[in-house]
Image: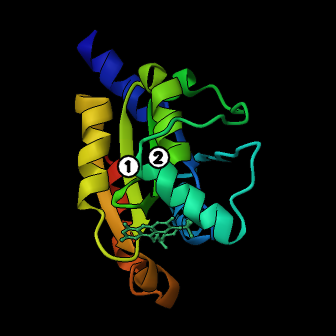
Amino acid sequence: MATYFKFLALVIPMRILVLYYSRTGTTRAVAESVASSLSADLEEVTEPQSRKGLLGYLRSGFQAFRRIVVPLNPLVHEVAAYDLVVIGTPVWAGRLSSPVLSLVRLHGADMASVAWFCTCGGSGDKARDEILRELGAKVIATAVFREKDVKNGTAADGIATFAQSLGAV
Ligand SMILES: Cc1cc2nc3c(=O)[nH]c(=O)nc-3n(C[C@H](O)[C@H](O)[C@H](O)COP(=O)(O)O)c2cc1C
């Protein structure tokens, strides 16, 4: 029987969903690359309210700093149907972006297993601590990518290694 289940695990591919929020496209670029490497489903987390311009920037920093949960548009994919959800977020004020904090508060309980990455200008350490506090042992892998490395292509190897490590879980 054990051999039968091992065989099933080999022939039935793991279902993976990549969910990301991106205000200016950097996190989107990483999410697309990870999803493509893993042949995973991909969905952008969206909100009813725009974050464009200076006002959007200031509101984003304030909401992340205060850990404010914001309204999101409904997800298209059912997170509970996936073996692994990969969550991508920009770092705002050292924290998870508020759409991603809202995502994990709304849907985290339905996620079986989570891998997380962020893009940031400087450090993603505090945001990593935050996702670990929010989702605990469900988080099986984390990665931090600098915005400038994503943009100039030097993050490509790290992104590929992160994706490959998830494919082997
Ligand atoms: C409101 C705001 C606050 C930010 N705060 C930080 C920060 O505290 N630390 C950091 O390293 N980067 C910070 N950043 C930079 C973003 O994390 C970085 O540009 C990220 O790659 C943007 O991702 P996106 O293009 O997917 O939106 C901040 C950006 C914004 C808009």
Q: Horizontal and vertical percent for residue 134? A: 32, 33
Q: Horizontal and vertical percent for residue 93? A: 39, 61
- The label shown at residue 94 is none
CB at disc 2 and ligand 1 closer than 8 Å: no
Which of disc 1 and disc 2 is earlier in sequence? 2
Q: Is residue 48 above or below residue 77?
A: below
Q: Considering the image in quadrants, where does the N terminus appear?
A: top left
Q: Is mark 1 on a helix, strand or loop?
A: strand
Q: In this rendering, would 115 be left or right of 30?
A: left
- The answer to whether the residue labelled 2 contacts the one labelled 1, judged by CB atoms less than 8 Å apart, is yes
What residue lies at 30% left-to-right and 63% top-to-bottom?
A: 124
Q: Quadrant of residue 139?
A: top left
Pointer 2: what residue? 87
Colouring: rainbow
Pointer 1: what residue? 116
Q: In this rendering, would 46 be left or right of 113?
A: right
Q: In this view, does 82 lie above or below 153?
A: above
Q: Is residue 163 visible?
A: no
Q: Can residue 157 be seen in this view?
A: yes
Q: Horizontal and vertical percent for residue 24? A: 63, 70
Neighbor class of circle 1 (other Cα within 10 Å; few <14, some 14-19, many 20+) is: many
Say which of 94 and 169 sits in front: 94
Say which of 123 and 40 sits in front: 123
Name which residue type carries label 2. Ile
Neighbor class of circle 2 (other Cα within 10 Å; few <14, some 14-19, many 20+) is: many
